[in-house]
Amino acid sequence: MNIFHTIKEIKAHIALLRKEGKTIGFVPTMGALHEGHLELVRKACKEDDVVAVSIFVNPIQFNNPEDLVKYPRTLESDIKKLNATACSIVFAPAVEEMYPEPDNTEFDFGKLDKVMEGEFRPGHFKGVGIVVKKLLEIVEPTRAYFGEKDYQQLVIIRYLVKSLAIPVEIVSCPIVREPDGLAMSSRNSRLTPEERALAPDIHDALNRIKENYTWFTPDGLGKMIIGDIEQNPLFRVEYAEVADAETLMPFFDWEDAEHAVLCVAVVLGQVRLIDNVLLY
């Protein structure tokens, strides 16, 4: 496995692969890899000749400086996990390599970045857009793989790629869950044992709602799940939104959206967890 730390080195290596006609799969991550990340890598390995994984904790997408400090950095163990897959390239740059100068690129995501995560994490999606655009320009992959746990991010990245005509196929992959239903996340390692035991209640609530969503209006469904989750006072729901799965906009009748997604953000102790379920 080739490990690169500079843009110049990885671009030179990728250029050789492209001359050989190789297809390149790319999985961008912030490290602290878990089974969810590895499933993306495995899918890429099945579909592409060469697979590259980036490991970069992107400082400009953290609206809370404390979250940036606490984010786990486990490069050595991440590389060991990737060695057990068919991944052949790791790109692990320093912040100074990615941002030798401040990058103030602005994006117009319309309303996509104004709702849900955008409301509670101002500037987050600008940081995501900057780093994803930069990484796609560096790696020039045939396909890039993203998990559906960060559903809003996935929709925004699709929009970014289309609006900027970046020649890459964005491949979405289902949420990978623990046996008890908790969506896999690097943040889960910060939960206390008591909190970890409670965390699957979020997914349980989503499943209960999905089975009976037609009993409610879209707006009423969001309010219902907030009440359900917050029956336990250790949970605090930041938002629970039913949205059009394509536009992320709210709607008022089930017939108004071809596909609907229910997205939630829940604070448990000091950890903020997100999850979602496609209703139809």
Image: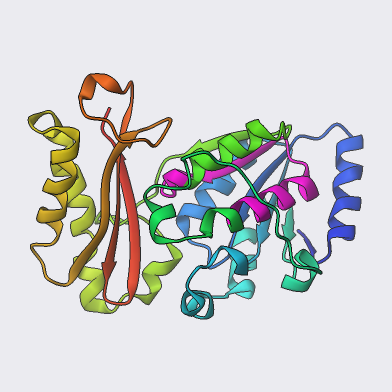
Left or right of 61 on screen, residue 214? left
Identify the image quadrant of the C terminus. top left
Which contiguous range is marked in magenta? 128-152
Residue nearer the viewer, 212 or 79: 212
Residue at x-position 26% and y-position 32%: 279
Q: Quadrant of residue 1?
A: bottom right
Instruction: Point out residue 81 in the picture as x, y percentages from the top left corner.
Output: 58, 63
The number of discs equals 0
Left or right of 278 on screen, residue 223? left
Instruction: Point out residue 242 in the picture as x, y percentages from the top left corner.
Output: 27, 39
Residue at x-position 61% and y-position 66%: 60
In the depicted structure, whether residue 102 falls above or below residue 260: below
Report whether residue 115 is seen: yes
Q: Quadrant of residue 262?
A: top left
Residue nearer the viewer, 251 or 6: 251
Image color mode = rainbow
Q: Quadrant of residue 249?
A: top left
Q: Is residue 129 magenta?
A: yes
In the depicted structure, whether residue 100 falls above or below residue 110: below
Left or right of 136 on screen, residue 279? left
Q: Is residue 127 magenta?
A: no
Report whether residue 84 is seen: no
Residue at x-position 60% and y-position 58%: 127
Residue nearer the viewer, 103 or 186: 103
